[in-house]
């Protein structure tokens, strides 16, 4: 008689978790599916833990419905991230055949986690909020609430001194884009370190920070929507307290305090580069804003090899902007430099790292690079 291999124990019953087990009886062909967002057909984000593995035995995992996901083309050239300890993440070579994503590993330990990108878990999110609030000079300016009652604090580094520029950074409107909150951790790192360039920045400007706009979606393992199934980055013209209180809160505070620079931090599934999208299709896009955008992008290219201007989205024609997007809505509303910052889920082909691909650590460093550029540009913003 041949011994029967035990069924692998696969779990996603934790914050940011997302997977459905179809058949885990064969370790060489474990069939899984990604669960759609609540009240939405969007899906792409996954995060699960496999236990009861035999070290050095090869296991193959198959995401059967990858080809029906929100961005099926994104799986080409993508490698899954994995970790034995939930802290150190590495890439696992993956294959996509147009229908399913498949990856194999002979694990070193009996337990391993897999995810679409290095997750930013709820415990770390709460720690980041506490770190931000503990910073000397940081104010908890206002407190918003998600649909499910999770806190959405607005932090301000500054005291409202007249004449200072108001710089807004928000992140993770799309909850599966976890690199966005890693970026915001880099902002908090920079404030804690208080290097001379940061001190110079804060002499001229105040930072307004929303570290995670969509904590419900992140908790539930969504890709793109909040608990009501709404894409927050398509709600900046019709936000309501009933369906999109997250955006309603941020807009309310922006109207109260004003905006001189807006950066909305995201991740892109398909494009293996770091890039920005701006509001060139806005009715109010002027030569002044165009000049600021050009100067910002050129300076960021000079600051870090992780930014480039060759690859990105097609630019909107004049007057053709989607005004429901945050970048366009805020650029028009406040006549300011307004940018969407995109980081890859894949490796970053301008400076590849086969072990980690684009990662949380690189997202954190990008935040510091971007803020150094902003520090140089503050006098030009108005």
Image (tube, rainbow, N blue to C red):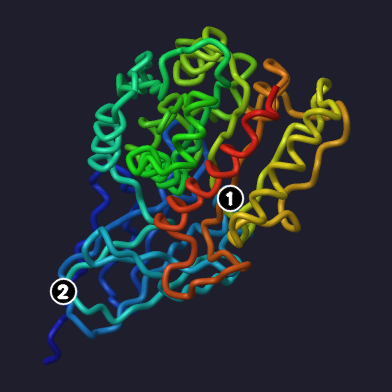
Horizontal side of residue 284 vs 145, given as left or right: right
Numbered marks: total:
2
Which mark is drawn over residue 77?
none
Horizontal side of residue 93 vs 10, given as left or right: right
Q: CA distance from mark 1 to mark 2?
A: 38 Å
* Residue located at (45% from left, 11% from top): 242
Asked whether disc 1 touches disc 2, contact meaning CB atoms under 8 Å apart, the reply is no
Query: Which residue corresponds to mark 1?
Result: 268
Task: From the top left corner, tell me how far across and down residue 160 is, in percent.
Answer: 46, 12
The residue nearer to you, when weighing 62 against 379, is 379
Which mark is drawn over residue 6?
2
Residue 315 visible in the displayed image: yes
Q: Is residue 361 above or below residue 95?
A: above
Task: From the top left corner, tell me how far across and down residue 333 is, in percent.
Answer: 69, 15
Task: From the top left corner, tell me how far across and down residue 4 is, in percent.
Answer: 16, 81
* Residue located at (63% from left, 67% from top): 350
- Within-10-Å neighbours for mark 1: few <14, some 14–19, many 20+: many
* Residue located at (75% from left, 58% from top): 310
Horizontal side of residue 44 vs 13, given as left or right: right
The residue nearer to you, when weighing 289 against 73, is 289
Task: From the top left corner, tell me how far across and down residue 149 is, in percent.
Answer: 30, 19
* Residue located at (66% from left, 30% from top): 338
């Amino acid at each position: 008689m041949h011994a029967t291999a035990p069924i692998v124990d696969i779990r996603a019953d934790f914050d940011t978790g997302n997977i459905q087990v179809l058949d885990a009886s064969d370790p060489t062909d474990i069939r899984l599916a990604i669960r759609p967002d609540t009240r939405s057909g969007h899906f792409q984000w996954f995060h699960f833990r496999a236990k009861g593995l035999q070290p050095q035995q090869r296991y193959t995992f198959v995401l059967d419905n990858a080809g029906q996901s929100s961005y099926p083309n994104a799986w080409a050239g993508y490698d899954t991230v994995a970790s034995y300890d939930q802290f150190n993440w590495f890439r696992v070579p993956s294959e996509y055949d147009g229908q399913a994503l498949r990856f194999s590993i002979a694990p070193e330990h009996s337990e391993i986690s897999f995810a679409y990108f290095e997750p930013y878990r709820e415990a770390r999110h709460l720690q980041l909020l506490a770190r931000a609030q503990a910073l000397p000079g940081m104010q908890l300016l206002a407190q918003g609430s998600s649909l499910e009652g999770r806190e959405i604090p607005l932090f301000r580094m500054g005291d409202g001194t007249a004449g200072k520029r108001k710089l807004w950074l928000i992140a993770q409107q799309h909850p599966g884009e976890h690199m966005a909150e890693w970026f915001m951790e880099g902002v908090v790192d920079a404030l804690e370190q208080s290097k001379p360039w940061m001190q110079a920045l804060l002499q001229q400007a105040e930072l307004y920070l929303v570290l995670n706009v969509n904590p419900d979606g992140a908790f539930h393992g969504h890709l793109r929507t909040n608990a009501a199934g709404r894409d927050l980055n398509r709600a900046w013209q019709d936000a309501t307290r009933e369906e999109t209180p997250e955006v309603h809160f941020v807009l309310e505070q922006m109207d109260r305090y004003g905006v001189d620079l807006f950066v909305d931090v995201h991740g892109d599934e398909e494009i293996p580069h770091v890039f920005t999208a701006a509001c060139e299709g806005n009715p109010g896009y002027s030569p002044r804003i165009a000049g600021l955008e050009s100067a910002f992008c050129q300076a960021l290219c000079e600051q870090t090899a992780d930014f480039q201007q060759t690859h990105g989205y097609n630019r909107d024609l004049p007057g053709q902007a989607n005004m429901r997007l945050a970048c366009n809505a805020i650029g028009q509303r406040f006549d300011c430099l307004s940018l969407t910052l995109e980081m890859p889920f894949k490796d970053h082909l301008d400076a590849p790292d086969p072990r980690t691909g684009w990662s949380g650590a690189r997202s954190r460093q990008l935040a510091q690079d971007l803020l150094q550029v902003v520090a140089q540009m503050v006098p030009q913003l108005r």
